[in-house]
C-alpha cells in the first residue's frame, strides 16, 4: 500500500503536465463577444423591423458570423472604427481598446462559439 503513494504522485504529475493545454486567453462568442454585441450593436442590428431598419443583422452567432465572413464586421469595427454608431442621444458610445482587442483576436482565432 505504501508503494502506491509515490506512484500516485508521479501519475498526478504526468497527468498535470501532459494534459492538452487549453489556451486560457481564448475568447469565445458566448463568453466575450456576445456581451459586447448586445450592449453596443443590437439596438440597431437586432434584425427586427424597428431596429433603424438596417438589414445587417447581428442577432445571434450565425448572423454575426456572416458579417465576419463577408468582411464588413472587421472593416467597420476594427479598420474604419465607425461602428458602433452613436445615436445622437448617446454621444461617445465607443468600444474600448480592450474590447477591440477581444474582437480582433476572436476573428483571428476563427470566431469560436465556445
Ligand atoms: C445607432 C445605431 C447603430 C449601432 C449602435 C451600430 N450600428 Fe452598425 N450600422 C448602423 C447603420 C444605420 C448602418 C448602415 C449605414 C452604414 O453602413 O453606415 C450600419 C452598418 C453596419 C455594418 C455594415 C453592414 C453592411 O452590410 O455593409 C456593419 C458590419 C455594422 N454596422 C456593424 C456594427 C457593429 C459590430 C456594431 C456594434 C459594435 C454596430 N454596427 C453598432 C447603425 C448602427
Image: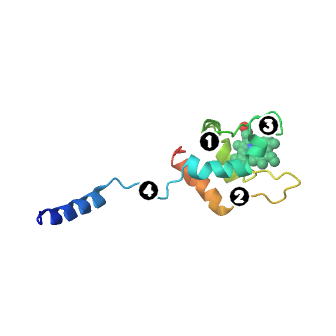
Is there CB contact under 8 Å for labels 1 and 3? no
**Sequence-wise first label, 3 or 4:** 4
Residue hosting label 3: 54
Q: Name the residue located 69 percent from the left edge and 61 percent from the top edge.
A: 96
In the rendered structure, find residue 68 and report the number of the disc placed on it: 1
Residue 44, disc = none
Q: Residues within 10 Å of mark 4 (few under 14, many from 20)?
A: few
Q: Earlier in the sequence, mark 1 or mark 3?
A: 3
Q: Quadrant of residue 91?
A: bottom right
- The quadrant holding residue 50 is top right
Is ligand 1 within 8 Å of the beta carbon of the residue shown at mark 2? yes
Q: Is residue 67 above or below residue 95?
A: above
Residue 42: give x, y in percent of width and height. 74, 44
Residue situated in front as seen by the camera: 7 or 51: 7
Q: Is 17 positioned to the left or the right of 27 in the image?
A: left
**Residue topped by disc 4:** 23
Alpha carbon distance from label 3 to label 2: 20 Å
Q: CA distance from mark 4 to mark 1?
A: 22 Å
Closer to viewer: mark 1 or mark 2: 2
Q: Quadrant of the N terminus?
A: bottom left
In this orientation, which residue lies closer to the viewer: 7 or 84? 7
**Residue 103: x percent and y percent?**
61, 52
Check disc 2 and report the residue beneath it. 95
Q: Residues within 10 Å of mark 2 (few under 14, many from 20)?
A: some
Secondary structure state at the residue bearing disc 4: loop
- Which of pointers 4 and 1 lies earlier in the amino acid sequence? 4
Instruction: State the count of labels.
Output: 4
Distance between the alpha carbons at the discs numbered 3 and 4:
36 Å
Mark 2 and mark 4 in contact? Answer it, CB < 8 Å. Answer: no
54 horizontally vs 111: left or right: right
Mark 3 or 2 closer to N-term? Answer: 3
**Can residue 76 be seen by looking at this rendering?**
no
Amino acid at each position: 500500500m505504501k508503494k502506491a503513494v509515490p506512484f500516485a504522485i508521479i501519475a498526478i504529475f504526468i497527468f498535470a503536465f501532459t494534459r492538452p493545454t487549453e489556451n486560457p486567453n481564448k475568447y469565445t462568442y458566448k463568453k466575450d463577444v456576445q456581451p459586447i454585441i448586445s450592449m453596443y450593436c443590437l439596438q440597431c442590428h437586432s434584425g427586427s423591423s424597428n431596429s433603424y431598419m438596417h438589414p445587417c443583422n447581428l442577432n445571434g452567432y450565425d448572423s454575426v458570423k456572416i458579417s465576419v465572413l463577408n468582411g464588413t464586421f472587421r472593416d467597420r469595427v476594427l479598420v474604419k472604427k465607425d461602428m458602433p454608431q452613436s445615436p445622437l442621444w448617446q454621444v461617445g458610445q465607443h468600444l474600448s481598446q480592450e474590447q477591440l482587442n477581444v474582437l480582433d483576436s476572436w476573428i483571428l482565432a476563427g470566431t469560436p462559439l465556445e
